[in-house]
Image: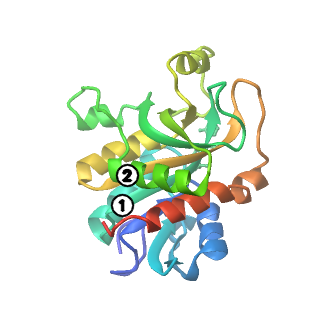
Amino acid sequence: MSLHINAAPGDFAPTVLLPGDPMRARHIAQAYLADAREITSTRGMFGYTGLWQGQRLSVMGSGMGIPSCVLYATELVREHGVRRLLRVGTCGAVSPRVTLGDLVLAVGAGTDSGVNRQRFGGHDFPATASWPLLRALAGTAESAGTPLHVGNIFSTDLFHHPDPALVARLSGMGILGIEMEAAGLFGAAAALGVEAGALLAVSDHLLDGGAMTPEERERGLDRMIRLALDGAAAMPAP
Ligand SMILES: O=P(O)(O)O[C@H]1O[C@H](CO)[C@@H](O)[C@H]1O
Ligand SMILES: O=c1cc[nH]c(=O)[nH]1
């Protein structure tokens, strides 16, 4: 048990999928995992452990934004023995190459957050996903014929961003999508010595204005969830 996670020792599997939305965590557990059991519910941030292809796997909400995600990632690693963290989130597309419902695998994440600079003496930390996770997810997608964009994303502290030039700036630098956690998760994972990745489904398009409904966001992310589960199952235990 830790301050924000009321799970018992051994409740978490070494690999945890981290959607921002705790209701997406519940959906993944109930719709995909065998023998799923709720193991934490502090503040409504539900976590579950069950089986996928016979392997133990956990899924837990991370909340919205870097501070929330990093808090849970830190307690999961330090106090619950977790070694591999895979964010399964949504993003807004900022690239004309990406369309609604597409999947994006983050190689690196730029950010307007200061958290990694706080960790890194004021310098720019290279917030990148772990290679074993990148390789497993890209390989699993290729084998399954699942289309996947692999590239850089941007993690913002401000969903309702005040800078009207931000989307054009990101787009001009080849960024694929914007979300709110990955850069902090990658920095935390580096500091904690564990693996992290981020697989995202495009829930809205910031260039053309298209958007999934909230119901589609919660339930309509089947391809992302299956790829995350299959990719995690294809990896050796961390
Ligand atoms: O769908 P999730 O995983 O929550 O991810 C995205 O959605 C939230 C904003 O609506 C932020 O957490 C952002 O990163
Ligand atoms: O952070 C996010 C997530 C989805 N869509 C956005 O525009 N931003």
Residue 216 position within the rendered picture, expressed as x and y whole percent measured from the top left: 76, 53
For residue 223, side relative to residue 54 (left or right): right
Number of numbered discs visible in the structure rendering: 2
Q: Is label 1 within 8 A of ligand 1 (CB to nearest ligand atom)?
A: no
Kind of residue at disc 2:
Ala
Residue 152 position within the rendered picture, expressed as x and y whole percent measured from the top left: 47, 32
Residue found at the very far bottom of the displayed protein: 35
Give the mark nearer the N terminus: 1 vs 2.
Answer: 1
Residue 153 position within the rendered picture, expressed as x and y whole percent measured from the top left: 50, 33
The residue indicated by pointer 2 is 196
Residue drawn at x 72%, y 60% as measured from the top left: 219
Residue in front for this viewpoint, 88 or 62 = 88
Q: Are marks 1 and 2 in contact (CB under 8 Å)?
A: yes
Residue drawn at x 42%, y 38% as measured from the top left: 107
User: Is residue 220 in view?
Assistant: yes
Residue in front for this viewpoint, 135 or 216 = 135
Number of other residues with Cα within 10 Å of mark 2, as a class: few under 14, some 14 to 19, many 20 or more:
many
Identify the disc placed on residue 84.
1
Where 32 sits versus 123, above or below? Answer: below
Q: Secondary structure at mark 1?
A: strand
- What separation in Å lies between label 1 and label 2 (alpha carbons)? 6 Å
Kind of residue at disc 1:
Arg
Number of other residues with Cα within 10 Å of mark 1, as a class: few under 14, some 14 to 19, many 20 or more:
many
Colour basis? rainbow
Q: Secondary structure at mark 2?
A: strand
Where 159 sits versus 144, above or below? Answer: above
Residue drawn at x 60%, y 60% as measured from the top left: 225
Residue in front for this viewpoint, 50 or 215 = 50
Quick one: quadrant of the C terminus? bottom left
Quick one: quadrant of the N terminus? bottom left
